[in-house]
Image (spheres, rainbow, N blue to C red):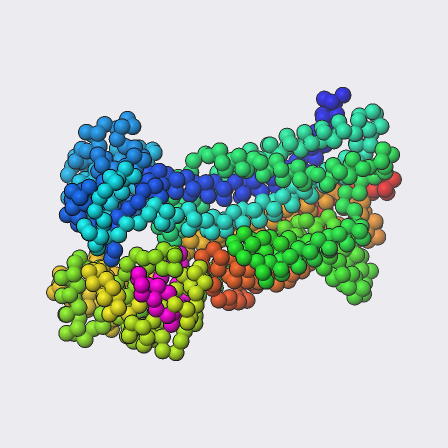
Amino acid sequence: MTRACLAALLSHWRRNPLQLFAFLAGLALATGLWSGVQAINAEARASYDAAAATLGDGQFDQILPRAGGAIAQSDFVALRRAGWRVSPVIEGRLSDVRLVGFDPLSAPAGFGVGQVGDGVDLGAFLNPGQLFANAATAAQLRVDMPADMPADMTVVIDPAIAPGIALGDIGVVQRLLGRDDLSRLLVRPDQPMQRPALTDIAPHLRQQGADQRVDIGELTKSFQLNLTAFGLLSFAVGLFIVYSTIGLAFEQRRRMVRTLRALGVPLPRLIGLMVVEVLLLAFAGAVLGIALGYVVAALLLPDVAVTLRGLYGAEVSGTLQFRVSWWGSGMAMAVLGAVAAAGVRLWRIARMPLLASARPRAWAMTSGRAQFVQGLVAALLLVGAGGLALVGDGLMAGFALLGFFLIGAALLLPLLLRPVLTLAEGAARTPVARWFWADTRQQLPGLSLALMALLLAISANIGVATMVSSFRLTFVAFLDQRLAAELYVEVEDQAQAALIEAEMAARGTTVLPLLAVEAEMAGLPARLFGVRVGPTYRDNWVFLDAEPDAWDRVSAGTAAVTNEQLARRAGLWVGDRIEIAPGIELPIAAVVADYGNPRGQVIVGEALFRELYPDMPVHQLGLRTQDPAGLRHILISELGVADAAITDQAALKAFSLQVFERTFAVTAALNVLTLAVAGFAMLMSLLTLADLRVPQLAPVWALGLTRRRIGQLELLRVVVFAAVVCLFALPVGLGLAWVLLAVINVEAFGWRLPMFLFPGDYARLGVYAMLAAVAAAAWPAWRLMRTPPGALLKVFAHER
């Protein structure tokens, strides 16, 4: 009996291949976008973990320079002779590869992926011409290796090493970087009980605890949460297809269910077999979706890697691996989503009387009670969103606000469409027009899920487009503010910096030295900057909030400026005091926007900075000039500055904007995919409804409307639906943009962006949405136009 019942249930899909395709395609699209996003996030997390394992991040205390720069080898020798068990590390970059050199004999266990003693011969590791990296990094190193390097320099492939990182003996890396200093010292856990204090041996150095390291995973969590939110939205849109397909299939099989129960099949067994049926189909759709997700992730991962490197300095592998975490997540989401979509229908079957009518009522009119419940749920969600907007705190509260708002708006859509269609019907003057509007209102329940999916997709596009375009306008203005100098020069040493300053002063050129040091401000990792206050800063920097004489007080050393990130995270604002050095507090005279920077910053005057850090070297100079090309020639030909050390303002802006574009390339791609899935949802709904529409259209055809005219009206119906959805999506999308800019962005990144409106973009998006709707309706309308007259006549021969 069980086998026969299961065969009978599955035969429905064989007789209705279009429904089977809609179910599998909808689930595959939903799972594909979700699993693709999860694959990207899993690859990023794996890269962070590999980097932490490679370099022992967060496991060891470190010794760093107080004023930035490097550590002299003599300091390392002095500490070792004083009894400090420290190990030297040097870091630098060779093109896009991060070189890390360490001493395997003194490095603590767990640093460098245990290169020594884990199958790697110590003599081989100490080979003066050898580096260790994974396959992708090794290939890049072979291309970027300097031409003057020895021919015997080789790269050994080790898959355990994090992407973008190459390890080697400290002597090998020093030779490659052309340096004889150190970047940091690792403090071994097994220190002697009695040893001199660090300040007695090297007062210009400081010890940083393992728990004070910046966690790259925490910094990038907000970006990954944004991707996850888009993946979840896409999954919900795709699940609408599955829900509508399952609903249609279950309604069409009411007669079969009645017959099977009348033949003696127990209700629990029948429901259990239907669950098995859904699970089998869900598993097939999940496999297709995971394969699709792999393709999506492989296409988007390079852009994500560039984004995370540009925004956070995080190295992420550009190649994708099949990991259990993301394909297991995709499989679970697909199965749970399909079961949830079928749950309501199974509950109805469980409550259906044995002799219930078997007439197909595939898309019955929504009952008044169902409308009331739907409206109540929508109202509760929107009220909850308002409450979270007023009192919510934290990133998760922001995403909950986003979810409540979008779902509430989607549930409200059919309830708002019905009175609009009723008014249109009342205003119609011809019989055909009145029938058109009445029939359109009658089709609303069958298309409501597809219309909700279209609403979510259009709203997401409007919201994200507003956010990205607002960010672009603000970011370009921010670059003009921050990159005011026409040329930027990287100096080799302080002698060269003094020479350039003296020469530029003689020529009347304004010089802006860049002084910076890593520090802890208000309990948060930050950077302290010293600036030479002048017309450049006074004329170009725009503060979010400031006291009238802010720059005068900064120049005098009696006040400081903080960026928005530090001010919001520390709960400080203009007028509050902040400790810039041990025992030294300054009032905050202004708060400045600092878009794209995850770290806190404090700006003080140059004189105060040099007083606090007299040995801090200048690494970069900004030069104001009316003739960048001529000044560049003077720097190279007369002052001996390398051409590669000079960067002009235009190049910096172009690079920054390039990073910006790559940053939002993934978001734009997910937006397009979401809109495509919504269009597909509408296509599947219209196709599955097409056959059921024949009994409703046959009387109209018999009254004189041609099949061509009927097809045109069907196409017009979808255009009307799409137009109304676009109008409703505009306020929803703008509300979404406000949440992203004023709530999510502040919680995730620490800055708030101004919101701008872009009517031209919204109009263009509306046109795209209309085209997508027309494309979705074209095939079903064509099928109705091609319906044979005999099929229409048969309607009157059956009991309908």
- Magenta stretch bounds: 578-603
Q: Quadrant of residue 506?
A: bottom left
Residue 217 vertical placement versus 250 (above, below): below
- Which residue lies most toward the bottom here? 548
Q: Quadrant of residue 657?
A: bottom left
User: Residue 640's spot in the image, x, y percent?
Assistant: 13, 61
Q: Answer yes or no: is residue 233 visible.
A: yes
Residue under the point 43% across and 65% down: 572
Q: In the shown orientation, is residue 712 left or right of residue 426?
A: left
Residue 229 vertical placement versus 622 (above, below): above
User: Residue 660's spot in the image, x, y percent?
Assistant: 40, 57
Please check the rendered image and state whether residue 591 is part of the magenta-colored stretch, yes or no: yes
Please check the rendered image and state whether residue 729 is part of the magenta-colored stretch, yes or no: no
Q: Nearer the viewer, residue 411 or 548?
A: 548
User: Residue 675's spot in the image, x, y percent?
Assistant: 57, 51
Q: Nearer the viewer, residue 140 or 392?
A: 392
Residue 522 vertical placement versus 54 (above, below): below
Q: Quadrant of the N terminus?
A: top right
How many marks are shown on the rendered structure?
0
Q: Quadrant of residue 764?
A: bottom right
Provide the major secondary structure of the magenta segment: strand
- Which residue lies most toward the front here? 194
Q: In the shown orientation, is residue 645 left or right of residue 743?
A: left
Q: In the shown orientation, is residue 355 left or right of residue 73?
A: right
Residue under the point 66% across and 49% down: 450
Q: Nearer the viewer, residue 369 or 392?
A: 392
Residue under the point 29% across and 72% down: 557
User: Residue 261's spot in the image, x, y percent?
Assistant: 82, 28
Q: Quadrant of the C terminus?
A: top right
Residue 469 vertical placement versus 132 (above, below): below
Q: Answer yes or no: is residue 298 visible.
A: no
Residue under the point 45% across and 54% down: 664
